[in-house]
Image: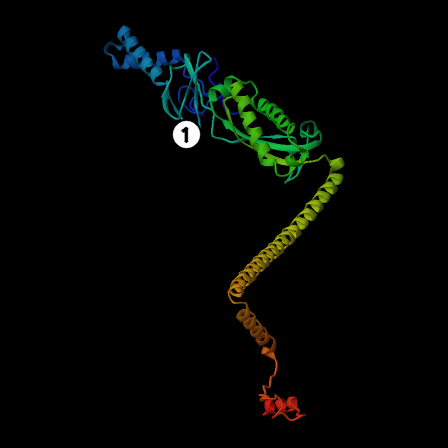
Amino acid sequence: MPWSNQGGNDGGWQGGGGNRGPWGQGPGGQQPPNLEDIIKKGQERLKDVIPGGGGGKLGIIILLLVLLVAWLVSGFYKVETTEQGVVLRFGKWTNTTQPGLNYHLPYPIETVLTPEVTKVNSIEVGFRPTRGDNTTPVEAESLMLTGDENIVDIGFTVHWRIKDAGLYLFNIEQPEVTIKAVAESAMREVIGRTNLTAAITEGRLMVETEVRERLQEVLDGYGAGVHIMQVQLKNAEPPAPVIAAFRDVQAAEADKERAQNEALAYANDVIPRARGQAERIRQEAEGYKQQVIAEAQGEAARFLSIYEEYAKAPYVTRQRMYLETLEDVFAGTNKIIIDGGANGNDNVVPYLPLNELMKGSASK
């Protein structure tokens, strides 16, 4: 088995402990020391230490014990905070470890992969980034059929990271290709039940949310071991050949909405005033009605009271009514009262300009 194994986000392999080899030494891929060389060097050192110049069986046993301890200690490995440890036993995934100091059975029984799991990766669907802010559309991916049987040109980006390194490395052979294919399928599913106007205007956030949820659901079903962080629409518009006509339609819709708003504002101004005037007229009519009824009831009550008095004393009542009527008639006129005496004409000059005299006295 090679000492440098595949690992990381691109499906490659690296030695246990990030850039360290399975023996915890140097960069990944460094070859372990040869056991025969170690034994020979140990025997030479034992010859110098043990009296008589020979190690014998005891030296060999001590050397084997030292080698055994060194072999067991080599099973310790460290997982960084940005990584997860994937333990392989004879090449088969058995366990996933979290950041910190961990232990596995030494090589060749078990090895460890430590892919980075906090890095955010991006996949573009429907377009390809070019120089600057420009993009190149990919029609085979971007053209989709909407729920109202229109065609929309959509480009979007999927942001994701590794959630479970073991599932990511061993359940899917080409994770990025799988994520892209599932993302395109999820977007077509959501756009297929969304109207064109909503997809390119106020419904963009809803589309992004539904696609992210659907994409995460499918990938979890595959056991992909990835977390979809965000689906971001880059563009959503009609195809280029019809975009001019579509903009004309949008302008007409905007004019229609503006006219409707103006009509609604006018109605909101006129209708309340008309209702207020109608209510005022109704209240005035109600007041006039109450006034007429009250006056009629008062006149009727007055007539009945006079009639009762008239029934008791007809002459007196007639006289009083006559005098009251004269009082009402002459209340607003100039009057001169002359006592005519016994004959009625003894002290009256045949012609006297009484009106002119009254005017003169009024001017003084």
60 and 86: which is toward the camera? 86
* Amino acid beneath label 1: Thr
Image position, residue 10 (x, y; %): 54, 24
Q: How is the image coloured?
A: rainbow
Q: Residue 89 at x, y = what percent? A: 43, 13
Q: Please name whichever residue, 224 or 347, is drawn nearer the observer in this view of the structure.
A: 347
The answer, for residue 176, to whether it is visible in the render is: yes
As displayed, is residue 106 above or below residue 181? above
Residue lying at the far front in this picture: please name it: 342
In the picture, measured across the screen, residue 40 lies left or right of residue 306, that is: left
Q: Residue at x 33, y 13 (%)?
A: 67
Q: Is residue 113 above or below residue 258?
A: above
In the picture shown, does residue 61 fall above or below 6?
A: above
Q: Which residue is mark 1?
A: 81
The percent position of residue 263, horizontal first and vertical second, equals: 68, 49
Which of 166/23 is in front?
166
**In this picture, residue 244 sits left or right of residue 276:** right
> In the figure, residue 111 lies in which quadrant?
top left
Q: Quadrant of residue 350?
A: bottom right
> Residue 203, how many percent across, how many down?
61, 36
For this orientation, the residue located farthest to the left is 51
Left or right of residue 273: residue 61: left
- 351, above or below 176, in the image: below
> In the figure, is residue 51 to the left or right of 247?
left
